[in-house]
Image: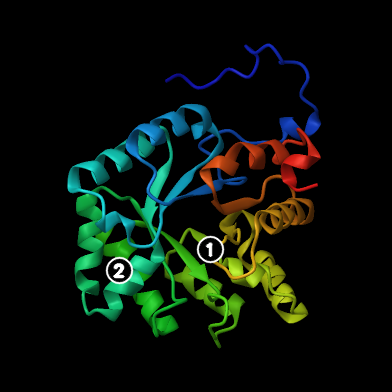
Amino acid sequence: MQPMNPDDHPFAGLDGTRVQQRTCKPRASGRTMVIDWGIPLGQQRDFTDIGAEYFDFAKIAVGLSRLCSRELLRQKIDQYRSRDVEPFPGGQYLEYAEVHGKRERYLPACIEAGYHWIEVSDNLAPVSLQWKERLITEAVKDYGLHVLGEVGRKEGLDNTIPLVDNARACMEAGAEVILVEAAELISQDAQTAAAVDEIVRVIGLDQVMFELPGPWIAGVHSCDIHHMRRLLIERYGSQINLGNVAPDELLSVEAYRRGLGVNAGGG
């Protein structure tokens, strides 16, 4: 499918200056990551037909890569990549492999499946920062993979490593994007908020992707997600990188980025 020509459209000429600021793919900022909780292949094709221009990554959540047949998983990966969207398996699957003593099989399996990107996280498994650094370096140097390094913790779990130190170590090991865990973003602690700002200052806004909270976090509702994305865009600008966007929320996120209706961002 040919990329959409923004000038060949019934509403061309109505765009304001904020729309002009949005980057086109491939882009290094203003990226969006959609979370795929098992979208059927036909629905995925329809979804990318309408939205591929507006998102850059698709996280195949948790260990769902294992639940798809070999053929179906390859079709999902190839279909995303044919539309300039990079799929990757959720970091919890890597942590699962580590906990069950199967970590050495994980990176070769990702290559065999057809992934070009992986996520390296430490929010569930009892692993060290050194473990993350080794994994990232191995993925990049030995397997030619691109890495998103996640920092933070799931709600209710302790992580004593300062966020900025965790993020810096991931980048130095070879990660290209830092994912800031959603639980950190809904914290009411001023120290945590300051730590997130410090990550942005040290790493750079273009390399930081903010993962939106979801219903998997206790007490989080749709209105909270809309409120969070609106605050993030207002705080850091329309070119912020946003992750964990639900497929049915993709266009409303893009609409709010472009100023096409404040209600698209939560009121």
Residue 48: where, in percent of width, then height?
Answer: 45, 32
Q: CA distance from mark 2 to mark 1?
A: 17 Å
Q: Can residue 44 be seen? A: yes
- Secondary structure under tag 2 reads helix
**Which residue corresponds to mark 2?**
138
List the residue tagged with mark 1.
178
Helix, strand or loop at mark 1: strand
Residue 219 shown left or right of residue 129 in the figure: right
Estimate how packed mark 2 is, as few (under 14), some (14 to 19) or many (20 or more) residues with alpha carbons within 10 Å.
some
Which residue is pictured at 57% across the width and 68% down the height?
217
Query: Is 266 on the left or on the right of 225, as rendered?
Result: right
Rendered image quadrant of residue 124: bottom left
In front here: 118 or 89?
A: 89
Going by the numbered disc 1, the residue's amino acid type is Ile
Q: In the image, residue 3 lies at what x, y percent?
A: 50, 22
Q: Badge 1: how crowded within 10 Å, few (<14), some, or many (20+)?
A: many
- Mark 2 or 1, closer to the camera: 1
Q: Are marks 2 and 1 in contact (CB under 8 Å)?
A: no
Q: Is residue 225 above or below residue 135?
A: above
